Amino acid sequence: MAARTVRRATAAIATGAFALTAAACTNPGADTAAGGPKDSAVVGIAYEPDSLSPLLGYGKDGNSKIFDGLLAFDADMKLKPALAVKLPHVSDGGLTYTYTLRTDVTFSDGAPFTAKDVVFTYKTILDPKTNNPSRTELDALKSVEAVGDDTVVFRLKYPYAPFAERTVHAIAPEHVAGKQDVNTGPFTTQPIGTGPFVLTGWSKGEKISFKANPKYWNGAPAVKKFTMAIVKDDDVRATRLRAGDLDGAILPPNLAAGFAGDKGKRTYAAKTYDYRTVTLPTHNPVAGDTAVRRALDIAVDRQTMVDKILEGAGKPAYGPVPTDSPWFAKGTERRHDLAGAQKILDEAGWKPGSDGVRVKNGVRASFPLWYLSGDKLRQDHALAYASDARKAGIEIKTQAGTWEVIEPRMKTDAVLAGGGSPGDPDFDQYLLLTSSLAGDGFNNMAWYDNKAVDRALEDGRRTDDPAKRKAAYDTVQRELVKNPGYTFLTHIDHLYVVNDAWDSDAKGAPLTTQIEPHDHGLAAGPWWNAEAWKPRKAGDDKK
């Protein structure tokens, strides 16, 4: 959920031709020679991580710039070898995964990468003393052991179908991270990895800077300097892009539309699993009422949000699974039905008060809804949701704040949150809905507690039988119709506005995006494979 959540997909992606640049006078990292190729890029992102340590969750979904996993995802979200020389050998009925590792890889400090680093990484993540909020994603892992320097064997407790996708997780160096406190040591902000880039600086709230790793096992990147400017306010990010301070940026649809007439820039829409939802905290006397939840679920006009807020760049959301996913449970779509919402509330004893706000047993149907300051999309969704709710007689008071302000209130106050993870439905739903993770940071923010959902989530992750898994996740989605602990609003296409100076490879292929998770910009976006970019020569107006 929120800005700290991350994930992936199995469907094919759309591709687009675009690249990044800025005028030399506004991009101090660019080659200032007339007509010379550019060797740096500065991109604007909305969020920054809490840590740069894989042991604490950074790089768990790949594309971490500083690190590599055993496997990686290509542009079509298919697994390919990275630190492993090939895809794993799976045996013992899906309980054993054996990886053969590359022997020509070093960390950026020159130390060799070996199987012991893989074992160290996974064992440390599983250690309860490690503050990794995503530890339950590796619940299936029973043991991991090194066989020599170039072989790693994972043994599972049960046949967990998407386990190979979990091994895109970034690998940390034991010789560095193993000699300090895993939660507070300097490695959390000054990491060393095997990846294509080396961290050169992290000014929190301002920027994360990288330089090309000349020792990278897959070839030194042509992008010699890469900077992620952390600009939380959407309007400011658009202004800086227009001024030439940024080479590219993630923008909401209404701001991206302002660049439509700029011939020097391109807009690209990346398909995603990213949703916006309203948490309905179980501990709030109004939002926790099942009738109120059901009423809000059909009082909200999702299609109008897509049309007006997203300007068509997205689709209605009825749960964490997008409607075009093969895992979506057909028939769980909810129609916009204000009269039906009012009927549900009437029958449950929520009667209109003198001011139009419903009341039951002396309790007004009113609760606060927080959204992240500076996030226009969340603000617009929150205001539209409150407006729709008011028509049904429910008063929702919208308030902006930082996560530091919002997080302590999440047990009782609603939040306009984001989430979504492509690929396997376990990635989407377990952290979001299982009751055992209620109140665990940004996991299960609504404190949702549904025993039928808990059972189905366990069933879905403990078998590799496709039919049984589909039945389990259908059950989850149908239970969310009966008792929606969240009001899912929209799935959002990510829009990037960029300049033009790079191709995705030496053959002049256009840049691409993958299907993206909620946590966009940092590891996703057109720069998901910036290490493969090649500079476009001056005068090459390839479109």
Image (spheres, grey):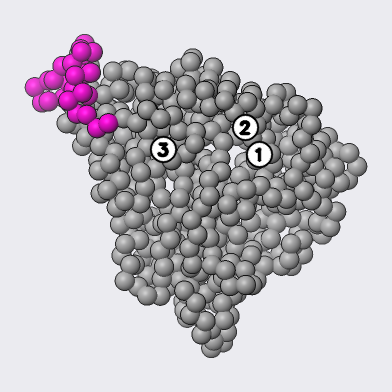
Local crowd size for mark 3, using a 10 Å CA cut-off: few (<14), some (14–19), many (≥20): some
Q: Is residue 411 above or below residue 275?
A: above
Q: CA distance from mark 3 to mark 1?
A: 24 Å
Q: Name the spot of residue 125 as percent of width and height, x first.
A: 69, 35
Looking at the image, can residue 207 be seen?
no
Q: Nearer the viewer, residue 240 or 531?
A: 531
Q: In the figure, residue 192 lies in which quadrant?
A: bottom right
First of labels 2, 1 by sequence position: 2
Local crowd size for mark 2, using a 10 Å CA cut-off: few (<14), some (14–19), many (≥20): some
Q: Which mark is residue 57?
A: none
Q: Regarding mark 1 in the picture, which secondary structure is present there?
A: helix
Q: Name the spot of residue 248 as percent of width and height, x first.
A: 46, 65
- From the image, state whether disc 3 or disc 1 is nearer to you: 3
Q: Which mark is residue 137?
A: 2
Query: Who's the residue at 27% across and 28% down the image?
Result: 298
Q: Which residue is mark 1?
A: 166
Contact (CB < 8 A) between labels 3 and 1? no
Q: Which residues are magenta?
A: 335-361
Q: Is residue 337 part of the magenta span, yes or no?
A: yes
Q: CA distance from mark 2 to mark 1?
A: 8 Å
Q: Regarding mark 2 in the picture, which secondary structure is present there?
A: helix
- From the image, state whether disc 2 or disc 1 is nearer to you: 1
Q: In the figure, residue 466 lies in which quadrant?
A: top right
Q: Is residue 541 above or below residue 141?
A: below
Residue type, numbered disc 1:
Arg
First of labels 3, 1 by sequence position: 1
Q: CA distance from mark 3 to mark 2?
A: 24 Å
First of labels 3, 2 by sequence position: 2
Query: Who's the residue at 79% across and 31% down the image?
Result: 91
Contact (CB < 8 A) between labels 2 and 1? yes
Q: Regarding mark 3 in the picture, which secondary structure is present there?
A: loop
